[in-house]
Image (cartoon, helix red, strand yellow):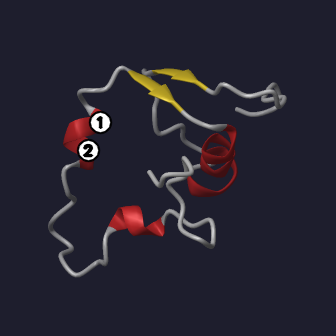
Amino acid sequence: MSLDGYIADKDGSVSWLNGDGSDKDNVGSYPEFLETVDTVILGYTTYNQIVTELSPDVWPYDGKATYVPTHRDCANQP
């Protein structure tokens, strides 16, 4: 996360999370780390990007308590 609280790059992309693609057999440590997490806290921008762009059909944090502290209405989101 940057000092201003964002994980996206200057264009709003989080594609850097996938690495540079040079090692197709190495998925990194994120999947293993995620198994140790039981609660996810997201800002609205990240939450909205997940449900509209990155993973609109499958919630990637299924089975984990998820909180989105925001003043925006998330009622119509999956």
**Amino acid at dot 1:** Leu
Q: Quadrant of residue 68?
A: top right
Q: Position of residue 45 (x, y in %)?
A: 68, 46
- The residue closer to the viewer here, 30 or 52, is 30
Above or below residue 61? Residue 5 is below
Q: Quadrant of the C terminus?
A: top right
**Amino acid at dot 2:** Pro
Residue contact between numbered discs 1 and 2, judged by CB atoms under 8 Å: yes
> What is the spatial separation of the Cα atoms under label 1 and label 2, in whole angstroms?
5 Å
Q: Position of residue 39 (x, y in %)?
A: 42, 21
Give me the residue at 47% from left, 68% from top.
15
> On residue 60, which mark appears?
none
Above or below residue 55? Residue 19 is below
- The residue closer to the viewer here, 33 or 10, is 10
Q: Secondary structure at mark 2?
A: helix
Q: Position of residue 76 (x, y in %)?
A: 83, 31
Q: Quadrant of residue 47?
A: top right
Q: Is residue 13 left or right of residue 32?
A: right
Q: Secondary structure at mark 1?
A: helix
How packed mark 2 is, by other alpha carbons closer than 10 Å (few <14, some 14-19, many 20 or more), is few
Give me the residue at 44% from left, 51% from top.
1
Q: Is residue 45 left or right of residue 29?
A: right
Q: Position of residue 3 (x, y in %)?
A: 49, 52
How packed mark 1 is, by other alpha carbons closer than 10 Å (few <14, some 14-19, many 20 or more), is few
Q: Quadrant of residue 11?
A: bottom right
Of all residues shown, which one is farthest toward the front?
3
Q: Is residue 40 left or right of residue 29?
A: right
Residue where numbered disc 1 is placed: 34
Above or below residue 28? Residue 13 is below
Give me the residue at 23% from left, 38% from top.
33
Q: Is residue 34 left or right of residue 57?
A: left
Residue where numbered disc 2 is placed: 31
